[in-house]
Image: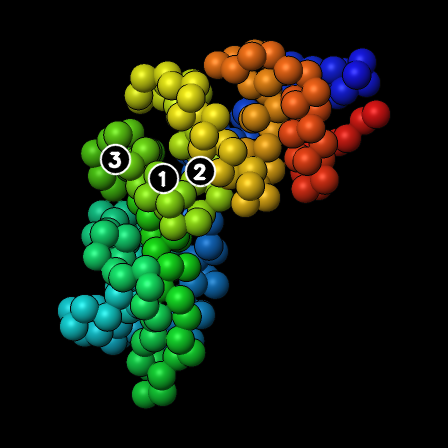
Amino acid sequence: MNGFCNTIKDNKMKKLIFALVAIVCGVCSTNAGEAQEDYCGDTNLSDCISHFDKQCEANNYAACFVLGELHYKQKQHSESKKYFEMVCDKANSKSSFQVKLLDGSLSKKVPAIEAMQVACSNLAKIYGTGKGVRQDKGKALQYDKKACDLGEAQSCATAGFVYLFGDGTKIDYKLAKSYFEKSCEMQNFYGCSMLSVMYRDGKGVEQNLSKAKEYHDKACNLGKIDCDE
């Protein structure tokens, strides 16, 4: 047990928390060049956007998602938000997404829920940082919770973090624990690690070093921290 306690000393937990803060405060990770190349190929960006815009106007939410990605990469955050909201708020998670490509062929069908996870998660980051929109941490949490419900593990961890530290909302240890548990069940490193912290410190739960070690070891097995004996 002493080895475990040494492994999760405060300096290591600070690194973990700072890493999670970076994710909470970051916005959409896809490389701009990659996004344009994937969706547009050699076509002029404005022509590419026009192509997908016509499909989005016809309520093709796959095309709306593509537009959200493309506008974000051009740092047009308010436009990006508009399209991501269409996907996150209006798409049917049980349907499949397909777009007409620039060469006239149809793309492979993909589950709509996958694009919705990304759209909702990105909206949470956009509102959380206030890039291109008025910062609204309440909306950010709302979209993280929706993304979590759709199966986005990182958004579950982020929601847990918000409730644990009261970032824009009241501290609620019960909800923090619940979201970290959902995240950990989906094999998310941050969810498991933050559960370890809660049980180690007795923060909102009865202190239990055995459970803390259990969650710490699970996080270790996910391969993102040093696992000293």
- In x, y percent, where is residue 191? 54, 33
- In x, y percent, where is residue 192? 59, 32
The amino acid pointed to by label 3 is: Lys
**Quadrant of the rendered image containing residue 187:** top right
Mark whose residue sits in front, 3 or 2? 2
Residue lying at 40% horizontally and 66% vertically, measured from the top left? 111
Neighbor class of circle 1 (other Cα within 10 Å; few <14, some 14-19, many 20+) is many
> What SS does tag 2 mark?
helix
Residue closer to the observer: 201 or 28: 201
Q: CA distance from mark 2 to mark 1?
A: 7 Å
Lower position in the chain sequence, tag 1 or tag 3 = 3
Q: CA distance from mark 1 to mark 3?
A: 9 Å
Residue closer to the observer: 151 or 161: 151
Residue lying at 37% horizontally and 16% vertically, measured from the top left? 171
Q: Circles 3 and 2: CB distance less than 8 Å?
A: no
Residue lying at 52% horizontally and 15% vertically, measured from the top left? 205
Quadrant of image for the C terminus? top right
Residue lying at 32% horizontally and 88% vertically, measured from the top left? 104
Direction right: furthest residue: 229
Neighbor class of circle 3 (other Cα within 10 Å; few <14, some 14-19, many 20+) is some
- In x, y percent, where is residue 159? 40, 32
Q: CA distance from mark 3 to mark 2?
A: 15 Å
Lower position in the chain sequence, tag 2 or tag 1 = 1
* Residue wearing tag 2: 156
* Residue wearing tag 1: 144
* Residue wearing tag 3: 139
> What SS does tag 1 mark?
helix
The amino acid pointed to by label 1 is: Asp
Residue closer to the observer: 29 or 110: 110
